[in-house]
Amino acid sequence: MDIATTSEWGTVSALAESFDALDLRRLFADDAGRVERLSFSVGDLLVDMSKHRVSDEIVTALVALAQRAGLDRRVESMMRGERINTTENRAVLHTALRAPAGTVIEAEGHDVVSDVHDLRRRMAAFCGRLRDGDWVGCTGAPVDTVVNIGIGGSDLGPSMAYEALAAYRHERLRCRFVSNVDSRDLLAALSDLDPATTLFVVASKTFTTSETLTNAVSARRWLTDALGDAAVARHFAAVSTNQAAVTEFGIEAANMFEMWDWVGGRYSLDSAIGLSLMAAVGPERFEEMLSGMRIIDEHFAAEPLSRNVPVLAGLIAVWYRTFCGLPTRAVLPYSQALRRFTAYLQQLDMESNGKRVRLDGEPVGCETGPIVWGEPGTNGQHSFHQLLHQGTTVVPCDFIVFARPDHRAVAEEAGAEATGHHELLVANCLAQAEALAFGRTTEEVAASGIAPDLAPHRTFPGNRPSTTIMAPRLTPSVLGQLIALYEHQTMAQGVVWGINSFDQWGVELGKSLAAAITPELSAPEPLPLAHDPSTNALIARYRELASRGLGAGDG
Ligand code: F6P
């Protein structure tokens, strides 16, 4: 079905024609119940959507559009294990990873939930030994550092959550994350490590990703140069679907943790990909994170679309991107612990919804996934917030803020209790959302005594929309709730657009071209080049520069 031909789409389009006239000052002034109606509590999250340029009529029309797109049926199909990822012929069952024991969810006639719980027991036993100092390396010394080698979903989830849950980390056991094939990443991670106390977790769903395998091979050489080939058995573990490749690499079957093809990379933190995180925060905290995800899963599955928080958030994102033409979306956590959260969401959202054809292969015919970007507050206020407030582009923002700080982490890292920081952090978050929404008119500027020639520069147009998500504290459960909230809103958007949010064919062309170019860069004699003239010239230039060694400015 081409959703753009439906009357529901027509209704939303017609409403979007008056987008410029939707004025947040007026919407608030005319409606005392707005905040109450557009603020939602789910789990520990308060999600205030009242500062969006939507009316009740618009929300109702968006919900009708989602209904017409079959969102509720699609959510059911996903959670039942149907192969909704049709271009890869796979089920999409990340929600099964946090289903309670005893639930039955079948993929291909087989209950996956019991497999998930069996695997998690193995993960917990492994992590328990690491945390107790009982997992010793080949010299008999306990492991003190877990180095996760992975990229994309095999890195961003665990590394983001490791930062987010810093307050819950084990006191002795630490993690490092290596993703970039730029050797500086690996070398920096290893620079102060002792091979005898280091364990590598090679995390790769496919075990074919060139960056990860290149880093893993170099890590293995670093280890075996120091401790000999036999050390691999005690110092390497793997997370993958690809048992044959893991074995060929030399990792023992007992140290391999299984993945399934029904877990997408960007939806995999709660699978064995979270092994390094579990080692750091412990199995109980990991389970708390899963329970948080489950709270949102249950809400997403059961709540009517009109009160369904991830659905409403997704629909508002569709409203801005598709109907109002706003190309980007900023996610601004006012939490240093969430400093990697936006990077994590970039993969989740942009790899899911950066699509130009529908499930049936036809062009989608409208704008799809927005560009997601952002940095933690308050840092962004002193760089790009200028554009948010006074630029010519309207950027819908998500603010994320916590009522209580992470005192333990602050105290440990700063070596002292930091007072007064948190109120300032929260005040800045709330102030940014207020300033964006309501601005400062030229009259207000003039009334404050600013010279008339400066008034236009000091005026804030306002009417810039945002969501504020507030939670008591960044606990493992709250982190799980936030992750699932974004996972499901990403899916909701994709369903309205009629695209497949669960494949990622767009990453393939670059991978195969890089595989072709690699030998062309390194062959002793130039190989015949069949690229475009620009790429051919760049390859030739690279060979010339690389063969010269250090340039004048490098010495
Ligand atoms: O290149 C994209 C991608 O396939 C992501 O979807 C995935 O998270 C990442 O690469 C890593 O893949 P793997 O876990 O198979 O190494």
Image: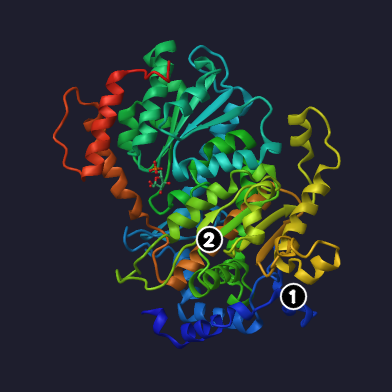
Looking at this view, is 345 or 142 the one in front?
345
| Amino acid at circle 1 | Arg
Q: Is residue 124 above or below residue 365?
A: above
Residue 388 image-quadrant placement? bottom right
Q: Is residue 128 above or below residue 235?
A: below
Which residue does the numbered mark 1 point to in the structure image? 25
Q: Left of 152 or right of it: where is 277?
A: right
**Can residue 53 be spotted in the picture?**
yes
Total label count? Answer: 2
Element marked by disc 1? helix
Q: Left of 184 or right of it: where is 282?
A: right
Q: Quadrant of the C terminus?
A: top left
Q: Is residue 328 above or below residue 305?
A: above
How many other residues sit within 10 Å of disc 1, few (<14), some (14-19) or many (≥20)? some
Which residue does the numbered mark 2 point to in the structure image? 328
Residue 259 image-quadrant placement? top left
| Amino acid at circle 2 | Thr
Quadrant hosting ligand 1: top left
Q: Left of 526 or right of it: where is 86?
A: right
Q: Left of 24 or right of it: where is 280?
A: left
